[in-house]
Amino acid sequence: MLAVDLLIQGIVQGAIYALIALGLTLIYGLLRILHVAHASLFTLGGYVGVIVTNQTGSLTLALCAAMVLVGLLGMLIYRVAYRPLLDKPPLVALIASIGLFIAFEEVFRIVFGSYGISFHNPPLRTQIEFGGGLFLSYSRLLIIVMAVSFLSVLAWLSSRTRTGVAWRATVTDPQMAASFGINVENVRYLNFFIGSALAGAAGVMVVLLTNLAEPTMGAVASYKALAIIVLGGLGSVRGTLIAALAIGIVESFGTVYIGHILDRDAIAFAFLIIALMLRPQGLLRAG
Amino acid sequence: MAYEIIVATTMAITILFALSLNIITGFCGQVSLGHAAFYGLGAYTGAMLTKAGWPLIAALPPAAVVAGSVGFVVGLASLRVRHDFLAITTMGVAFLFVGLVRKQEWLGGEIGIAGIPAAQFGRPGLLVLSIICAALFAALAVYIKRSWMGFAFDSIANDEDTARVLGIDVPRFKLWAFVIGTSGAGIAGALYAHHVRYIGPDSFGFVESVTVLAMVIIGGVGSVWAVALAAAVLSVLPLWFQFVSDYKLLIYGLLVFGVMRFSHDGIAGAVQRLLNRRS
């Protein structure tokens, strides 16, 4: 049953990666910015999740609070940091973003302490048993269910609503969209709000699994999410989802079978390099 | 004096490290998010050799060769993937390096290599050696910038496809940029190993790669003196901010962000604008 266990672990990890990377890919698709500070928003989501749950005892409320707060902060980052840099070379925004990421990590350390914070009573720890000795905790199940439902809502929004159509039009051709009367600036704010809110939700989920929100938890998210959106073809939503699941599964099998020569990150990146050498534009073309 | 010598050595080594990335990213326009891997390759090569009894000076060329050879392979990758894809591929190379080293017992594994022998000529001697290496590399960089090769690099950085149409052998020059840049990082790494005398997988992580890239960008892409200045300042900045110890990384991060936000072409660009205004 080891293989099935590993597969489930990989899918859970992949679902979390997908939620983090999705916001990043939306932002890249619209603005061509590699937004490293996205990982700070993910960390903030984790903190808000723990604090609100501890204060009110309601995980649902915590999740909503995390998504809204983090989404708003994402919009603020766009306004303050990226909007003035849009006509500059993309490297400039990348370095500015890295600077922000370092600064945020320190803010978390100073405000919440370097050891991190945990739930008073960790929610959803009970295991449910499926046939054949297969166990799955409620928190893992919840992660998969939430990832799928968020993605479905997003898919529905982008294909069936006027806002979604405006959004896709802006991604394809901003100038043309603007001349058809779409307020491109509003689309960008919306984009940052949704992308960041998803990262916040992912933060809450990771804290549910590890029961620890700490300042450096964004580090993994920062580089691995970049790897995932690149592997997915930069700006391709479907590619990102496939890449997130692929990296999650490759990692969970890799650490068991070749863990003695490479560590977890190295396995993910070895996979990335091989994939990019075979398909230099990523798994799927942007579009 | 001892403290000043240590600070100055750190500065000289960091300048060499940043100038080596400047060849790849600044001159040739190939963004690398994994330059610390080559620093690490040089450090490990140098440390293993001097632990086996080699003198430090003799260990520098092998360190350059090992880093440069791996740099050549990564350069081959740069012929296949471009732009952001290349940046992430180089980042992957760095993680691969760290991940491999972590699991190799003969390289010290997780714990790293401690007790690296001090340079035979003492700390002041190491400082002089580091300054000589950095100065030589800076001279090489200035020479390249003015040569035909520098022109070819520039054209590749500006527009690779047009450069190819104009008959510039793009793959050859890209490979040269990677080999020169990574060899320089290898030398810097070997010096660093004998400066701090302890290295481990965590000395060459993502943060180090990003920091050196930040130095190049903050200095001003492609400008030799400005990158050297930025490297010198940023390498000692955390020391200067000791008095606000809890906040030093916060200030560092905000500074990096602030420079990009208000002067996107770095120190070189800001100085250029200042000069233009006066004339």
Image: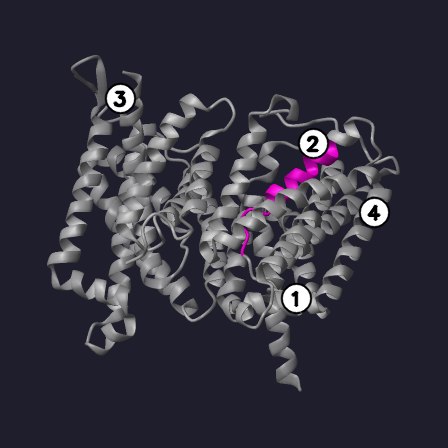
- Label 3 is found on which chain of the structure? A
- Label 1 is found on which chain of the structure? B
Going by the numbered disc 2, the residue's amino acid type is Tyr
Going by the numbered disc 4, the residue's amino acid type is Leu
Where does the magenta region start and end? B31-47
User: Along the polypeptide, which appears first: circle 1 or circle 2?
Assistant: 2
Q: Does the magenta stretch include residue A175?
A: no
Q: Are marks 2 and 4 in contact (CB under 8 Å)?
A: no
Which residue is disc 3 drawn over?
A: A4
**In the image, residue B70 lies at what x, y percent?**
62, 42
Q: Which of marks 4 and 3 is in front?
A: 3
**In the image, residue A257 lies at what x, y percent?**
42, 22
| Residue B2 in the figure: left or right of residue B145 | right
Q: Is disc 1 placed on a helix, strand or loop?
A: loop
> Looking at the image, which residue sits at the far top?
A133
Going by the numbered disc 1, the residue's amino acid type is Ser
Which colour style is shown?
Answer: one colour
Could you confirm whether marks 4 and 1 are on the same chain?
yes
Q: Is disc 2 placed on a helix, strand or loop?
A: loop
Which residue is at a point 58% across and 50% down the rendered structure image? B75
Could you confirm whether marks 4 and 3 are on the same chain?
no
> Looking at the image, which residue sits at the far left?
A160
Q: Which of marks 3 and 2 is in front?
A: 3
- Find residue B129 and name its label: 4
Above or below residue B179? Residue A173 is below
Separation (CA) of disc 1 from disc 2:
32 Å
Q: Nearer the viewer, mark 1 or mark 3?
A: 3
Going by the numbered disc 3, the residue's amino acid type is Val
Which residue is at a point 22% across and 62% down the rendered structure image? A168
- Label 4 is found on which chain of the structure? B
Which residue is disc 1 drawn over?
A: B223
Which residue is disc 2 drawn over?
A: B198
